Amino acid sequence: MNFMKYEEMAQVVEITRRGEYVLFVVRAPRIAHEAQPGQFVNIRVSDSLDPLLRRPLSIADRDGDTLRFLFQIRGK
């Protein structure tokens, strides 16, 4: 198994509601060129300690320098 570990400041390209789901698209060239759909990315959502842990999101798709995530909002 080959694990990648990159830390990259991503630029939010799009946030769109799709019914009860959210489509979240970010530009993260370094990660996008290596990652595959189905792999997980741990996303830090704030510079503060709230929430403390990063959010693991599965990559739904990638296109060039962008990654797409599709998820439901649960909890905080």
Image (cartoon, rainbow, N blue to C red):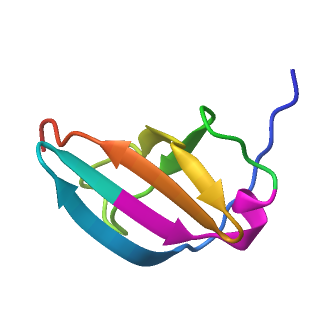
Pick the front one: 55 or 30: 30
| Left or right: residue 11 compared with residue 4 | left
Which residue shows up at 63% across the image and 39% down it? Answer: 37
Which residue shows up at 43% across the image and 76% down it? Answer: 12
Magenta residues span 24-33
Q: Quadrant of residue 56?
A: top left
Pick the front one: 8 or 52: 8
| Left or right: residue 67 compared with residue 23 | right
Residue 27 is a magenta residue: yes
Location of residue 55 in the rendering, given as x and y in whole percent from the top left corner: 39, 43
Location of residue 67 in the rendering, given as x and y in whole percent from the top left corner: 57, 59
| Left or right: residue 27 compared with residue 34 | left
For the C terminus, give its image quadrant: top left
For the N terminus, give its image quadrant: top right
Location of residue 50 in the rendering, given as x and y in whole percent from the top left corner: 24, 54
Location of residue 25 in the rendering, given as x and y in whole percent from the top left corner: 44, 65
Which residue shows up at 63% across the image and 34% down it? Answer: 39
On screen, residue 2 above or below 1: below
Determine the residue located farthest toward the top in the rendered image: 1
Residue 23 is a magenta residue: no
Which residue shows up at 80% across the image and 43% down it? Answer: 4
On screen, residue 1 above or below 13: above
